[in-house]
Amino acid sequence: MKGPNRLTGPPPLRLQLRRCALLLLLAALLAAVPGCSGGESPETAVEQFYALWGEQDYTGMYALLDSASGKAYSAESFRERYSGIDELIGLTAVELKKVEKREGGSGTASLYLTAALETSTVGRIPVYYTVELSRAEKGAPWLLRWHPGLIFPELTDGRKVDLKREFPERGRLTDRNGELLAGPGRFTEVGAVPGNYRDENNFAGAVGRIVGLSREAIVARLHQPWVREGDYVPLTVLAPGKESLVEELRAISGVLLREVERRSYPAGEAGAHLTGYLGEITAEELAEKEGAGYREGDLLGKFGLEAALEERLVGKSGCTLRILEENGKEAALIATREREQGEEIALTIDLKLQQCAAAALGEKRGAVVALDPRNGEILALYSNPAFDPNRFSSGLSAAEWQELQGNPGRPLLNRALSGLYPPGSAFKPFTAAAAVDAGALDPAKIQVITGEKWQPGKSWGDYHVRRVRTDVERMDLKAAMKFSDNIYFAQAGLALGREKFTGYGDRFGFDEQPDFLLPMARSLLSREGITSEVQLADSSFGQGEVMLTPLQAALLYSAFAGEGSIPQPRLLLDEEPAVWKKEAVSAAAAKVVHRALIEVLHGEGAAAAAGIIPGLRVAGKTGTAETGAEKGNVCWYVTYGPAEAPELVVAAVIEEGSWASTEALPVGRAVLECHLLNGRR
């Protein structure tokens, strides 16, 4: 048998694909050649050209040029000129508003155009063009006679476009009393002129040992691509507090020191998780913020309020767009935009209270939140371990950044907002409020509880709820709160029931985030729902799967310090107060819990009496949550005062502690005392 006739049959698939690819390549090549495209009318050709400019399709634009223009300007030079100018001015759109035909013969045309260029640097630029077009013969496409004046009318072959930027001052962050948290500061810069030393390796090693950089890092900076003979090269900036190194550096031949301005954070570590820090914009961020006026090398907020308030803090550069002669003399002024300084933003934070929180926490790992229950103003928000944001201003090396990220203490974690902890007994006021509000608990009724452990029936198997104080057998809510009786609150939770327990969780904002400037974790009653009586009982006294952030704990107690509602937490002083959760519980139920929390400190035989501030009545509750970890317990203390008219709630949490009464209580008390006794601001 003969095989198929390949001369008369369909070509094989591979050959078909090859032909298709060749046709596509030919079409692309033709499109890039002047005169191989064009418009049916002069108006159409012009509209196509400027539409393609708006899309930054320089190949398509070049295809609309006549042959004379193609000979005068190569495709590469055409593309480079347009792309360079578009990038320089931050072109975002080209709008052709009006096209008028001026004159023309059978094969030529002259059009007058009114257009506008939208830019991220100087805004909207009105431009007026006169465009000459021609066609080879009747029916042939219309093509443009191109020259640089079709970019800006004043531009010629010998002239260039120049953009002068006047950078704004980044807005300052201040506390509620005008104390600076972030703003301009003076730093000492360490630099050198390559060659102005005998031995580069010895020089780099000596400098590196003092400033904390490797010899290799110093050498790499001395040999950056832009460095030319005689250039001064910045090597690093000394962070505040490192001025003592200046004399050592001066002793090294070749070291140059000068004063420079950088973003400064006077509170240092005490304000780090609030202010955050600045960093150089990345390629990804530059793409995301296209059209916003950022350039390679610009700084922007990377963390904390520097990032959250970037748009308000950054301001806008002043820009002057000009056409310059070859000798640098101004030929034409195209457009200007006035510089807009960044906003100065006042926070609700009280710097003195913030520093008090840092001092009270000391070396302990944990967090403190202090807020006004009446309006949600946060007066202190501190997390430890922390970091010094000034290190970012002085230039953090790759090794230092890796060290910061790999630190087991996780100093970049804002524990006040994103730390999730089991609350232990500090959660009992929630169960009490929900049960009283729902009518499941009579706060005045004396309940008799005997023994060290309890279970409702044999269905629980070997599991029992256990308590510490077996000597107290008769108690109402006040006594149960004062002696922190687990059995009492487990029974209250079971009486309330799963559905209502989780319903009150919703009312208090669990598994929900308030509208807030900074990222925060969601507090949880459970991971996937409360599925058993045992879990409900454990959850009722703050174990089980209940997890709270320190901010959520402060908000929770705000309901008891007030009349059952929870304010919207806020950090900006000019922001209007708002309610986040209206009537999480009734005012009556909130008052019952409020009185019980006063009893915790001021009642006879109160274990938390150490939380009392002399001369004042305050409320509060400790909580020690067992985590099963070898490094200790999670210790809480949430307190507020004065009891008659609460104006500050303080939540303190300590990781890897022993008992809340010795670990967290002194921290929370110190912060509340600092506010109430040392000047309310």
Image (cartoon, grey):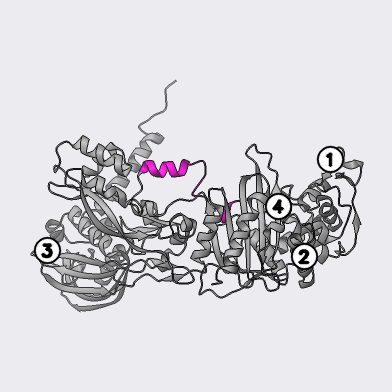
Pair 2/1: label in front: 2
- Residue 670: x and y in percent read 60, 59
Q: Measure the alpha-carbon separation of dots 4 and 3.
A: 77 Å
Q: Which residue is mark 4?
A: 623
Q: Residue at x 76, y 57 (%)?
A: 606
Secondary structure at numbered mark 1: loop
Give the class, few, some or many, for how many residues have Cα within 10 Å of label 1's Cα (few <14, many ≥20).
Answer: few
Secondary structure at numbered mark 4: strand
Give the class, few, some or many, for how many residues have Cα within 10 Å of label 4's Cα (few <14, many ≥20).
Answer: many
Closest to the observer, 372 or 296: 372
Pair 4/1: label in front: 4
Q: Measure the alpha-carbon separation of dots 3 and 2.
A: 81 Å
Closest to the observer, 316 or 103: 316
Q: Which residue is mark 2?
A: 593
Pair 3/2: label in front: 2
Which image quarter holds the C terminus?
A: bottom right
Q: Vertical placement of 50 versus 633: above or below?
A: below
Q: Which residue is mark 3?
A: 157
Q: Vertical placement of 309 versus 193: above or below?
A: below
Q: Residue at x 30, y 42 (%)?
A: 210
Q: From the viewer's perspective, is 250 left or right of 529? A: left
